[in-house]
Amino acid sequence: MKVLIFGASGSTGRQLVDAAVGCRHTVTAFVRNPATFHNDHGIDVVLGDVADRHAVAQAMPGHAAVLCVLGAATPLRRDPTLVAGVRHMTEAMLDAGVRRLVYLSFLGVPAGRHQLSALGRYVVAPVLLRNIAADHAAKEEIIRRSGLDWTIVRPPRLTDGPETGAYRRGESIHASQIVPRISRADVAHFMLTQLDDPTYLHRAPAVMP
């Protein structure tokens, strides 16, 4: 499948690119700063900023699906550029006839934090990570209203550990740890499985150990 990855130069994006290439997908990476992306696989790279509606629209045609792992630069403030970027992405998908979207969110959004521990529900998500949670919630709402075939993936804290395949997924699972963690590699694995699996179509599963 030919997939377009937004946020490919980030920590999770690099894991996603590696995993997608390993699964024999044809990958295009959309990156803002080429200096931060090492193209070890020789894949197609599109330089652009998600804040630029035209750049996003130009990158979209010809792809079968989009994987979005755009991350906030800092948890200290809201990032309206990324929220606008998700709107540009969904609009470009509709214009180009690209239906499938798998979006990486965060389990601390208001709609998902009931699956966290008490510390996560009442302190970490609404206080320490309130800006990240608010931005993801806004982007989720754009996606839900887009009319696309979307799946929103909600992990807790991400690590740089290896892929284990030993993770749970679902909308009714709950954290078994005070501060649950899952590797970026496991999240990338789950996101790729969603490209052709309708189980969580128009749903927002959590993924955690």
Image: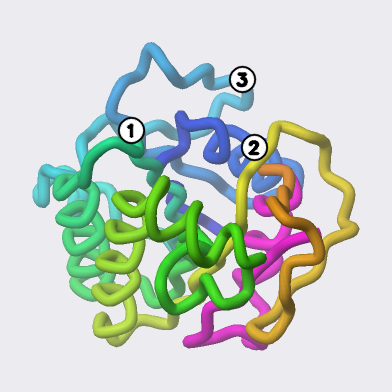
180 shown above or below 152: above
Name the residue at 49% across, 71% down.
Answer: 152
Kindly state the secondary structure of the residue where label 2 is placed. helix
Closer to the chain start, of discs 2 and 3, is 2
Name the residue at 11% across, 43% down.
Answer: 52
79 shown above or below 196: above
Q: Position of residue 131 (x, y in %)?
A: 29, 50
Left or right position of 155 against 35: right
User: Label 1, on which residue?
Assistant: 74
User: Label 2, on which residue?
Assistant: 15
Q: Residue furthest top?
A: 35
70 shown above or below 1: above
Out of 174 and 39, give the one closest to the viewer.
Answer: 174
Question: Which dot, 2 or 1, sits closer to the camera?
Answer: 1
Closer to the chain start, of discs 2 and 1, is 2
Q: Work out how far the residue at label 1 is from the one at label 3, CA to CA, in angstroms.
A: 27 Å
Q: Main secondary structure of the magenta part?
A: helix
Observer able to see residue 61: no
Left or right position of 141 against 121: left
Q: Is residue 189 magenta?
A: yes
Contact check, label 2 and label 3, Cβ < 8 Å: no
Q: Is residue 104 magenta?
A: no
Q: Which residues are magenta?
A: 185-209
Q: Amino acid at mark 2?
A: Gln
Dot 2 surroundings within 10 Å: few (below 14), some, or many (20 or more)? many
User: Label 3, on which residue?
Assistant: 40
Question: Which dot, 1 or 3, sits closer to the camera?
Answer: 1
Kindly state the secondary structure of the residue where label 3 is placed. loop
